[in-house]
Image (tube, rainbow, N blue to C red):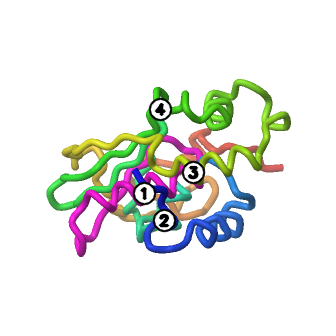
C-alpha cells in the first residue's frame, strides 16, 4: 500500500500540529488514531452523518474529536472502554459501520511502534523521533478493519431527564438519580473542605 501523505484530507504534518495544540504534545496514539479514522472513512459512504465509538479512554477519543463532528459533549462519540485500541464509525440510524483496530501482529515490521505500544521500555527511554517516523511510514498499514453492525441500544444517546434541587447540597441534579444527587450519595471523586 502506498504511503499516505494525508489524514482525512489534511496533511500529516498539519494533523500533527493539531494534535500538539489539542492534546498538548504529539502523542503517538493520537497520531495512529488519525490514520485509523482516515481508514474508516475510506470504507464508508460519503455524505452520511456518522457517530463514533472508541474502545479505549486514551488518545483515540481525541483523534475522533479532531477529525469528525463526534464529541463526547454532543453525545455522538461514545467511549466504551474495552481496553482495545480500536475505533468505529457508524451510521446511527442503521448501526452499519467500520471498526478499525491496531493489529499487534503487524507491529513486527515496526519495532519502535511495538516497543511503545506494548510498553516494553519506559517512555523516557524510547526514541520518540524514530517512533513518530515509523508511525508516519506505517500509516494505517498496522491496522485492520471490519464491517460491523453496532447494537444501537448499547450506545443510545442518553436524553436528559427532569431536574430537581438536591435537598443536601442545593444543586440541580437528575431526579432519576434518587432522593439526593449522586455526589451526595457518596459518588463524588473528591472531598469538600
Labels 1 and 2 touching (C-beta < 8 A) = yes
Give the Cα separation between the discs numbered 3 and 2: 13 Å
Point out the frontmost of discs 3 and 2: 3
Tell which of 60 and 177 is nearer to you: 60
Assess whether residue 43 is covered by the magenta stretch: yes
Labels 4 and 3 touching (C-beta < 8 A) = no
The residue labelled by disc 1 is 37
Q: Report helix, strand or loop for mark 3.
A: helix
What is the magenta range? 30-59
The residue labelled by disc 2 is 7
Q: Is residue 189 above or below residue 31?
A: above
Q: Report helix, strand or loop for mark 2.
A: strand
Q: Which mark, residue 137?
A: 3
Q: Look at 55% across and 27% down and name the residue there.
A: 108
The residue labelled by disc 4 is 106
Position of residue 154 in the picture relative to residue 165 (left or right) = left
Amino acid at each position: 500500500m502506498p504511503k499516505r501523505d494525508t489524514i482525512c484530507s489534511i496533511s500529516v504534518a498539519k494533523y500533527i500540529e493539531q494534535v500538539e495544540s489539542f492534546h498538548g504534545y504529539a502523542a503517538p496514539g493520537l497520531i495512529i488514531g488519525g490514520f485509523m479514522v482516515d481508514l474508516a472513512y475510506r470504507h464508508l459512504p460519503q455524505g452520511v452523518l456518522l457517530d463514533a465509538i472508541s474502545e479505549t479512554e486514551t488518545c483515540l477519543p481525541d483523534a475522533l474529536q479532531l477529525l469528525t463532528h463526534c464529541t463526547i459533549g454532543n453525545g455522538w462519540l461514545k467511549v466504551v472502554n474495552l481496553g482495545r485500541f480500536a475505533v468505529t464509525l457508524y451510521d446511527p440510524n442503521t448501526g452499519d459501520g467500520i471498526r478499525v483496530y491496531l493489529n499487534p501482529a503487524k507491529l513486527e515490521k515496526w519495532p519502535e511502534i511495538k516497543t511503545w505500544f506494548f510498553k516494553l521500555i519506559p517512555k523516557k527511554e524510547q526514541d520518540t523521533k524514530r517512533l513518530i517516523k515509523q508511525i508516519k511510514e506505517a500509516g494505517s498499514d498496522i491496522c485492520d478493519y471490519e464491517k460491523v453492525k453496532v447494537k444501537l441500544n448499547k450506545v443510545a444517546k442518553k436524553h436528559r431527564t427532569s431536574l430537581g434541587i438536591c435537598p443536601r447540597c442545593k444543586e440541580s441534579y437528575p431526579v432519576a438519580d434518587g432522593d439526593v444527587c449522586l455526589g451526595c450519595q457518596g459518588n463524588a471523586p473528591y472531598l469538600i473542605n
